[in-house]
Amino acid sequence: MFEDDIIRILQDEGITLISHLPCDKAGTLCALATGAFPHVPLLREEDGVGVSAGIYLAGGRPLIIIQSSGLGNMLNALLSLHGTFHLPLPIIASWRGMQNEVIPAQIPFNSRLPAILEAADIPYATIMEPDELPRLQEMIRRSFDEGIPTVTLFSPACFDGGSCPAGEFPNRGRTISSIPGSVIHEPEMTRYDAIAALAPHLGSALCISNIGIPSKELYAVSDRDENFYMLGSYTQASPIGLGLALAQDREVVVIDGDGSLLGSAILPVVASSAPKNLTIICLDNGTFGSTGNQITQGYAITDLAQVASAAGIQECVQVHIREELISAIREMKAGPRFIHVIIRPGNSAVQNIPLTPDQIRDRFMQAIRPAE
């Protein structure tokens, strides 16, 4: 069977984890892939880019399986994260909008997809007939050899049309726990204060720091090889942390923000993946701090600790002052964990990070896997 041949290629190429969203045109492939490999079921394709980055940084070989429409959601992350840090990511996409497409909404984007990928300088191959399958292996090898994303577009005509099984439906009854510290007080700490308080307690943990000023502040407070400073890719800090936690055993701490997490669908994915070594610290100033402190819904409307708890993360706590933050870091149980830190708006006068993307990547990967 054609789908079995695809799985054999993925196994031959040493793929270690698959991120995916279902596609009814490639249902059998989805079922086989999730049975053959560790996998992360996504809610939004873009989050798979970050998860895959974390997997690769820890020494794994990731791959994504989606329908091609999802590439539109992924383009910025593919270019700003994988393009900036030169990370590989092979993508398999069932090419919608082409073969006897009956959904009009699939056509406008997907009919232009080759031109879009060419404009983005993302190599791609098309597989319109089963005998063209060797192109997939070429794309996977090129991705890892050159440190770039690649896309293999499969015509739905290649697949057998089987559906991805839904699985059994367990009892949905459950009790939602209350959040410690759920009364929000007027904040005292700035983001810089919070980072200065938590940095001495990172120990040997691997740390992913959110884009913009948070990364600059962490660098100014406590530069270390175990810090991965994000330089772009809005919303991708926690997905990277999730991939990193799934791929190795060391503790992983993500320093994220309210704007980033409000724009992401990653928290339910974190809860369902359930890595025990992951802590997400949300430094919530209620603003888009790096762009001028424009107010977000987190300022006075949405409580991200409640969002994380409702997403299924069991270990959630909300803190306001330095002592509470330090206590939360020390006392959290097995993860995944979510520490919601209420802070004041404001940015410190920190300098740009004097490291190239490749330097950040290389020393971080060396810190994870030191030479023997």
Image (spheres, grey):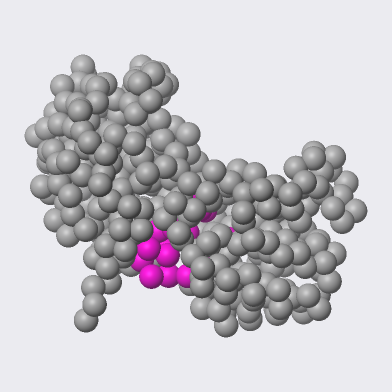
Residue 264, placed above or below residue 22: above
User: Which residue is drawn at the image coordinates 36% and 53% (left, top)?
Assistant: 357
> Image check: 261 left or right of 347?
right
Q: In terms of depth relative to the viewer, which is nearer, 254 or 91?
A: 91
x, y (%) of residue 77?
51, 46
User: Compared to 327, does 335 lie above or below?
Assistant: below
Residue sitting at x 68%, y 53%: 118
In the image, is residue 51 part of the stretch drawn in magenta? yes
Q: Which residue appears at 51% of the width and 72% of the height?
A: 145
Count of numbered marks:
0
Q: Which secondary structure dominates the residues rendered in magenta?
A: helix
Q: Is residue 339 left or right of residue 260?
A: left
Who is closer to the viewer here, 58 or 366? 366
Residue at 21 percent of width and 17 percent of height: 186
For the C terminus, the image quarter is bottom left
User: Is residue 50 something one can see in this rendering?
Assistant: no
Residue 195 painted magenta: no
Can you see residue 140?
Answer: yes
Residue furthest right as drawn: 100
Judge by depth and name the residue closer to the eye, 10 or 222. Answer: 222
Relative to 363, residue 104 above or below? above
Asked whether, in this view, residue 126 is left or right of residue 99, the answer is: left
- Percent across and percent down for residue 210 are 34, 41
Name the foreground residue: 361 vs 240. 361
Point out residue 258 in the picture as x, y percentages from the top left corner: 36, 31
In the rendered image, residue 322, in percent from the top left (x then y), is placed at 11, 32
**Relative side of 92 to 13, left or right:** right
Query: In the picture, which quadrant includes the N terminus?
Result: bottom right
The residue range painted magenta reads: 46-64
